[in-house]
């Protein structure tokens, strides 16, 4: 049993490539746009070199839900960042 768990952990660790999952994408959005209420995160593209998410949100004091799509790519140092850079202010 212990050997099986060790093999499984090794295989799963080898699959991790650093691309942000939905949890990391949500945390990225909430840190970048404080005060904006995130209502949903959906993966829209999942390629070898890029991963994109659609973020649905409500701005403070607004009833209408809006969305913005952000693409994450590896920056050459092994970090996955928003490329091109996401807007500093939401539409």
Image (cartoon, rainbow, N blue to C red):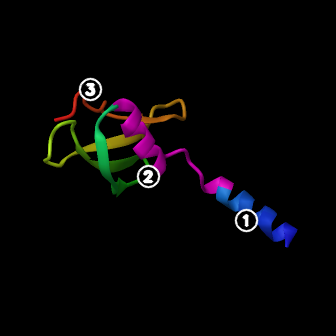
Check residue 59 in the rendering and tell me which mark sits there, or answer none.
none
Along the viewing direction, whichever of 84 and 27 lies nearer the viewer: 27
Q: Residue furthest top?
A: 88
Check residue 8 in the rendering and tell me which mark sits there, or answer none.
1
Cβ–Cβ under 8 Å for marks 2 and 3:
no
Q: Earlier in the sequence, mark 1 or mark 3?
A: 1
Residue 42 drawn in magenta: no
Cβ–Cβ under 8 Å for marks 1 and 3:
no
User: Which residue is at a point 15% across and 41% down the rendered structure image?
Assistant: 62
Residue 91, given in percent of the width and then of the height, sits at 16, 35
Q: Earlier in the sequence, mark 2 or mark 1?
A: 1
Near mark 2 (Cα within 10 A), the count class, few <14, some 14-19 or many ≥20, is some
Cβ–Cβ under 8 Å for marks 2 and 1:
no
Check residue 88 in the rendering and tell me which mark sits there, or answer none.
3
User: Which residue is at a point 39% across and 41% down the rendered structure image?
Assistant: 72
SS category of the residue bearing label 3: loop
User: Which residue is at a point 86% across and 67% down the rendered structure image?
Assistant: 2
Mark closer to the observer (2, 1): 2
Q: Where is 8 relative to 73, above or below?
A: below
Near mark 1 (Cα within 10 A), the count class, few <14, some 14-19 or many ≥20, is few
**Residue of label 2:** 22
SS category of the residue bearing label 1: helix
Mark closer to the observer (1, 3): 3
Q: Distance from label 1 to label 3 (Cα)?
A: 41 Å
Res. 21 visible in picture: no
Magenta stretch in the rendered image: 13-32
């Amino acid at each position: 049993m212990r050997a099986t768990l060790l093999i499984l952990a090794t295989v799963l660790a080898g699959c991790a490539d650093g691309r942000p999952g939905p949890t990391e994408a949500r945390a990225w959005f909430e840190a970048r746009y404080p005060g904006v209420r995130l209502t949903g995160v959906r993966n829209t593209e999942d390629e070898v070199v890029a991963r994109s998410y659609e973020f649905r949100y409500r701005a403070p004091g607004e009833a209408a839900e809006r969305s913005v799509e952000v693409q994450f790519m590896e920056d050459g140092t092994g970090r996955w960042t928003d490329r091109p850079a996401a807007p500093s202010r939401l539409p």
